[in-house]
Image (cartoon, helix red, strand yellow):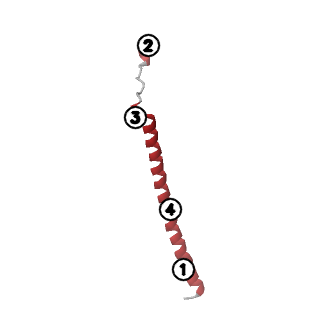
Amino acid sequence: MHACSTHRVFCDAQAEETARLNAASTTVAAAAHVHHAARSLRRHVQRHNVHRLELPVEVDVRSRFI
């Protein structure tokens, strides 16, 4: 094989491997971000008892005009 052809094959293989590593890294980073966000939200809910808040009662605005 000619030296230029060998170099081209090497570069192509390196580019493919780099693309695979970047894709894997991006996937891991996204999963870590989601995990961190979920933990933060869970701590916020526990700290502030958000699950115990009462929602306001809906008022029928039309009833004031009858």
Q: Specify the amino acid type for callout 3.
A: His
Q: Nearer the viewer, residue 50 or 1?
A: 50
Farthest residue, direction bottom: 1
Between the residue at mark 2 and the residue at mark 1, the CA separation in whole angstroms equals: 79 Å
Between the residue at mark 3 and the residue at mark 2, the CA separation in whole angstroms equals: 32 Å
**Image coords of residue 31 (percent x, y):** 46, 55
Q: Specify the amino acid type for callout 1.
A: Val
Which numbered marker is on residue 51? 3
- Find out whether the residues at labels 2 and 4 contact each other: C-beta distance under 8 Å: no
**Image coords of residue 49 (percent x, y):** 42, 34
Q: Specify the amino acid type for callout 2.
A: Arg
Question: Which residue is disc 2 drawn over?
Answer: 64
Please tell me which residue is depicted at 53% across the width and 69% down the height of the picture. 18
The first of marks 1 and 3 along the sequence is 1
Question: Which residue is disc 1 drawn over?
Answer: 9
Q: Which is closer to the viewer, label 1 or label 3?
A: 3
Please tell me which residue is depicted at 45% across the width and 37% down the height of the picture. 47
How many neighbours does mark 4 have within 10 angstroms: few (below 14), some (14-19), or many (20 or more)? few
Please tell me which residue is depicted at 50% across the width and 67% down the height of the picture. 21
User: Relative to 61, is 9 on the left or the right?
Assistant: right
Q: Which is closer to the viewer, label 4 or label 3?
A: 3
The first of marks 2 and 1 along the sequence is 1
Question: Which residue is disc 4 drawn over?
Answer: 25
> In the structure shown, which secondary structural element does the residue marked by tag 3 occupy?
helix
